[in-house]
Structure formats: C-alpha cells, structure tokens
Image (cartoon, rainbow, N blue to C red):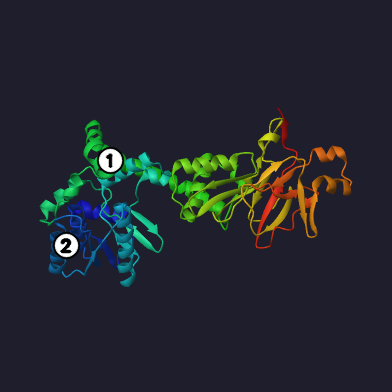
Amino acid sequence: MRKFTRQFHQEIDIDLTKPLVLSVSGGVDSMVMLDFLRRLKLKITVVHFNHQKRAISDKEAEMVQEYCDKFHIPYNYFKLTINSSDFQNRARVLRHRHLEEVASRINTPYILTAHHLDDLLETILINITRGANLLGYAGMRPVAKMGNYIYVKPLLYHDKESLIDYAKRHDVPYMEDESNYTTEYLRNRYRLTLVPIMKQENPNLLQVVKQYNNQLIAAYDAIRAKTIDFMEDRDSINIPKFKQLSQAIQEDVIAYYLEQNKVNLNYRLVERIREVLLSKKPNQTVTLSNQLQLVKFYEKAEIKPSAEFYFKKIKLKESDSKDKVHLDEFSYSSKRINTTALQVRISYDNIEFPLWARNRLDGDILEFDYGRKKLKKFLIDEKIPMEDRQNLWIITDNQDRILWIPNHYINQNLGTGKSLYITYYGGKEDEK
C-alpha cells in the first residue's frame, strides 16, 4: 500500500478534491484500483460495463455492486449490446461515451482506468505493428486530456504481478476474464506468445518499457510544442515554411493536422503526404477518407471535402501523345484556385467525365447561341494564322463535345446549373 501511495502522488498530478469516475470491469486490475483509491478516502464513483459476451458477466456485475454497496460507493451499471464486426472498437467508443456522461453528471473532468505496465508493453507492440506517430509508439500517458475530460491511469507503472500481490494481501475480490486466454484478439496473441519470450530474454523488460515510454513522451512533447507553434491560427499548411522544418517536426505537423480533422492516421499516410508537400509538382491531391482529401495547390495544402474535386488531370488523347509528353498540362477543379496560369470557368448542366485534351481534327464543330459552326471556318473567320491552327489544344468531354480552346473559344451553351474551372499550365512539354 505504501509503495502504491508514494507512486500515485509522484506520478498523478490532478485535483484530488474533485470526484473521480472509475471504470471497473471486475478483473484484478480495476478492483485493485478501486480498493486502493477507496483507502485513500477520495471521492469515487464506479462505472461497470456488461458486454454480455461471457457467461460470468452477470456475476461480475454483482460482485462489483456488492463491493460498492459495502463501502457506500456510487455505482453505475451499463449493459452494452453491440452488433458489429469491429466489436472491440465499438465497445471502446460506447464505454468512453458512458464514462463521460457520468463525469458530466457529477461535474468532474477525471475518468480513471486500470491500465498497467503489461498493458503498456502490449499497446506499444500493437502500435509498432500497425504503424503510428511518435505518441503512438510511446503507448500511454498516466494523465492525458481528451476533449473536455482527463483520462488518468494511476496503475500504469505497476506490473500485473504487483496487482495480484496487492489483491491477495488486502483480500480484494476479483474475477478472472477467461477471454484473456483466447487468441481471437491481437492483444491476447501478443500477451500469450511474444511477451513471455521477451520477458525471458530480459527479466527487467517492464522497467525498460517504462523508461522507453517516458523518453518517447518527452521527445513527443518537445516536437508537438514546435508543431503547435507552427500551426498556430492556421487551417492549412504553409509549404515554403514547412520545407524549412526538420523531418521529425514535418511528420508531426502532418499528424497533428490529420488529428485535428479526425482522420485516422498511420505512418504510410503521413509519409505519402510529406512526399507530396515536398515535391516540385504544384497541384496534387491525397485521398484521406470517403469524406476528405488533402489538396496541395502551389504554396499551401488544405484538407477539403471529397465532394469538391481539385486538380484532376485532363488526359491527353493517345493519338496526340506519340510525339510529345505533356506534364500536368491541364487540370480541372470544382473550385477556383489562385494561380497565374490560364484558367477558365465553364458552366454546364450535364457533361460526361473524364475530360480530354487533343489537337484539332477535321470535322470539329463549335456550339454558339445562334447555332453550330465548323472549327475550320471559325479559325478562318477569326484570322488565326495557319501555324497557330496546327498547335491548338482542344478540351473536350468524354463524348468529344468541345468545351474550350485556350485563348480562342469557350462553349457557353452547356447550361448554367454547375461550374468547373479548367487550368492550362502551358510550356511544360518535352520532345521525345
């Protein structure tokens, strides 16, 4: 008890005059947390979740309630019904929601969970396997702010063995979760196979993990402080300034920007975005989810809704690509962009995508308010020099309907319901 108390006061810096909401499953970890905090005479409220997945779930709930009744501790009970293939994630979301509801009701920001050193090791291994940012590799913090609430892990730097020893010495009731011994979940597979080998190689493994976690948290905090300073009052990434940052801060700027927009991130996505931001190509997009995309245009990058399209390349007709290679010659977007390149607004009701760029063909027809005219006659009437006629670019839709001829013609007979912007980045061609 003395060791637990000393470590608690050293590592957990919170306002202990406030009530504490405890998530108590009935396992040894959470029951030791409950018993320990009760003995400290703190204001505690218990929340228990019945996931209805195990035969002993009801008995577990009864045991936790009996303990709370015995010591006059407020008890909140939630039965969770989850019909989802992603059971673990859905259960986590529901638990957080109910815990925060209880915390709000009793006017406290503090929610306590019983994670310990063995959990920390498993979490680090999982995050390394899946790919994560620096904080993900660190694993967990003893105290972490999430929205309006502060999640506290008072047992984080105690190993499972010490918790079992505490339960025996203080006669703390608990139930063993038999699902901990199945290999259905990734965490269990690590716990049952990989972790025992690691502990065999290094008997002090968990203390090494604690040190590793603390070092990474310190490094993360230093980097994140610079990230927040860089992103202060910005809703986009300034690319010239971004390029002046070190790689570690660049990666965290991207991670932070994705986090702020609630995008699930992994290291591969962060690296892909970094490549785009550092590349010389001025206009690019990266798909982030079904709803969001990151759009790079010249000197800044922003997260935009996927419903808006930016910098879709206009394809070059194969017949016109044999002699020349055109790099980012044309693009189209649903929004006007700031650019010095030639840009035109096309109004339309219904055109068929994708768009194409090609040279003129015999029989090309243009549309006007007064009717149709052959392109050849239009060029003669407009007194376009013969050499210029041979080098004209024609932008068409997928039905070969002419939309635009840069500097010469805009089709204004397509309707008025929608708009798109076509941009021409001339002068980017290399002879084969």
Quick one: quadrant of the N terminus? bottom left
Left or right: 14 in relation to 40: right
- Report x, y in % for residue 112: 28, 59
* Depth order, front residue of 300/287: 287
Residue 61 tag number? 2
Say which residue appears at 29% left-offset and 52% top-offset. 88
Q: Residue furthest top?
A: 432
Q: Which residue is mark 1?
A: 207
Please determine whether, in this image, residue 242 is positioned above or below residue 429.
Answer: below
CA separation in Å, label 1 and label 2: 33 Å
- Badge 1: residue crowd in 10 Å (few <14, some 14–19, many ≥20): some
Say which residue appears at 30% left-offset and 65% top-offset. 98
Say which residue appears at 23% left-offset and 36% top-offset. 193
Quick one: quadrant of the C terminus? top right
Q: Secondary structure at mark 1?
A: helix
Quadrant of the image occupied by residue 371: bottom right
Please determine whether, in this image, residue 74 is positioned above or below residue 12.
Answer: below
- Report x, y in % for residue 353: 61, 49
- Report x, y in % for residue 239: 61, 46
Answer yes or no: is residue 332 visible: yes
**How many numbered discs sit on the rendered protein?**
2
* Depth order, front residue of 336/178: 336
**Three-letter amino acid code of the residue under disc 1:** Gln
Say which residue appears at 54% left-offset and 46% top-offset. 286
Quadrant of the image occupied by residue 280: top right
* Depth order, front residue of 328/230: 328
